[in-house]
Amino acid sequence: MIHDHNSQIEMLVNQLHYNNHIAPLSPSESLDVRADINTLYRLYDLQKIIRFFGQRYWEKETLDLGPIPGKLELENVAAHSFNVARCVPLLAPYFPWIDRARAIELALVHDEPEIVTGDKDPVGKDGQGSDTHAFNTARRLHKDLEERRALDALASGMRLTLRESYRTMFEELIEVSSEEALFVKALDKLQALVFVRLRKGGHITPDHVAFTIRYSRIGVHRFPPLQEHFKLVLRDLLEDVARSRPTEVQTFCEEAFIKLEGADQR
């Protein structure tokens, strides 16, 4: 039994450590990683700004609008894609082998098949993704097939000179066949983790934390040099929990770890 909640938090954070990787070029200063993550948090302030809200000629739309300016609502796919793309110029300079222009291009379009397929739920009925594309190989392959069909549908409406390059981009993403695709796939998971931390604000369940750790591992394994960024966001999330329920954090961490171990053993 670990009695110090900081030790328990670190026990969970270390679930994102990738033992088999020594980064050839990795952020060496913790202050740099903190500055990067704070920048990612700050960029979400853009999502809280509602265009045309309260302006003349937009009175009806303002009254009908559900979102409240200044509040982080559930994220739409376009906002997520922007945030992933915005990560590229922020984090790619650590990794000179990454073609930034290509990575930005991939990031901007990486979820466009969802125009056709919709946003697939990675969590599933058991809350741990065992029956979804997140951790079920058959479902993952089916999702890839759906995305290829969606790609054909989207490309068919484009001008002929653009179709082939568009398909090539998505094959690169689906097959994860380049360093840029690996990088973008990792950023996709990092942004998901950032959003969970900001939106939940410490009001999260142990089951959700267990899933979030497992889901974030996918990103770490895609691009291990980013593991310190992932770990810092997870640490911030768990510190939010500690602040929101200081007397329960020990039990919370123990429950999350038990759930994590159980899900990993399936």
Image (tube, helix red, strand yellow):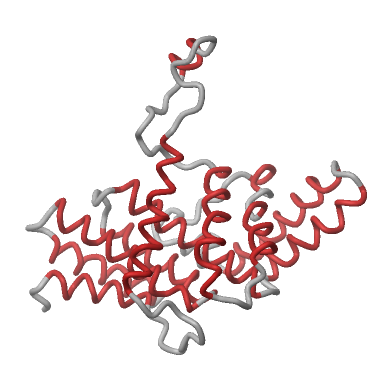
> Residue 122, image x and y in percent?
49, 56
Horizontal side of 255 relative to 82 (left or right) equals: left
Q: Is residue 55 above or below residue 216?
A: above
> Residue 64, image x and y in percent?
46, 16
> Residue 264, image x and y in percent?
39, 75
Q: Which part of the image, by quadrant, shows the C terminus?
A: bottom left
Residue at horizontal 56%, vertical 44%? Answer: 77
Residue at horizontal 66%, vertical 65%? Answer: 141
Q: Which part of the image, by quadrant, shows the N terminus?
A: bottom left
Horizontal side of 238 relative to 181 (left or right) equals: left
Q: Residue 137 lies in what quarter of the image?
A: bottom right
Horizontal side of 114 relative to 72 (left or right) equals: right
Task: State the residue lying farthest toward the right.
Answer: 160
Horizontal side of 160 relative to 244 (left or right) equals: right
Residue at horizontal 60%, vertical 71%? Answer: 182
The residue nearer to you, when weighing 165 against 52, is 52
Q: Is residue 150 above or below residue 137?
A: above
> Residue 33, image x and y in percent?
37, 69
Q: Residue 139 lies in what quarter of the image?
A: bottom right
Label count reads 0
The residue nearer to you, when weighing 101 against 199, is 101
Residue at horizontal 64%, vertical 55%? Answer: 110
